[in-house]
Image (cartoon, helix red, strand yellow):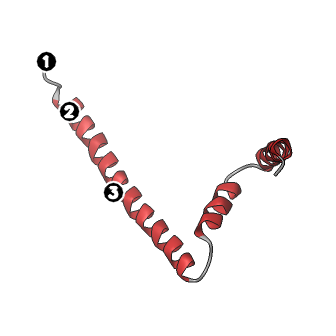
Amino acid sequence: MEAMDTAAAEQLRSFVERIERLEEEKANLASDIKDVYSEAKSMGYDVKSIRKLVSLRKKKPHELEEEEQILTLYRMAVGV
């Protein structure tokens, strides 16, 4: 197998280093988010509900409506 030319090797190294930096940033952000959830919990908020709210806010209105209709239908089917 032939060795990569210098430019290609440098480009690959650059990609890997960028990914490593982003992974480190992602880990720091995840830690910060965990801290916010912990703070909310210490103030008496239900973290499970907050997580659900965050998830719901990411969805589009028509997606929320469809999800709610399906959930209502399933609830009726099982008597909840």
Q: Position of residue 11 (x, y in %)?
A: 26, 36
Dividing the picture into quadrants, the one containing residue 76 is: top right
In this rendering, the answer to whether 26 lies above or below 44 is above
Q: Is residue 33 left or right of residue 43?
A: left
Q: Is residue 38 left or right of residue 44?
A: left
Mark closer to the chain start, 2 or 3: 2
- The disc placed on residue 24 is 3
For marks 1 and 3, give the one nearer the viewer. Answer: 3
In this rendering, the answer to whether 16 lies above or below 50 is above
Q: Which residue is mark 2?
A: 9
Q: Residue at x 62, y 76 (%)?
A: 45
Q: Amino acid at mark 3?
A: Glu
Quadrant location, the N terminus: top left
Q: Position of residue 9 (x, y in %)?
A: 20, 33
Q: Amino acid at mark 2?
A: Ala
Q: Residue at x 53, y 71 (%)?
A: 37
Q: Which residue is mark 1?
A: 2
Q: Residue at x 26, y 35 (%)?
A: 12
Q: Is residue 19 left or right of residue 8?
A: right
Q: What is the spatial separation of the Cα atoms under label 2 and label 3, in whole angstroms?
A: 23 Å
Mark closer to the chain start, 1 or 3: 1
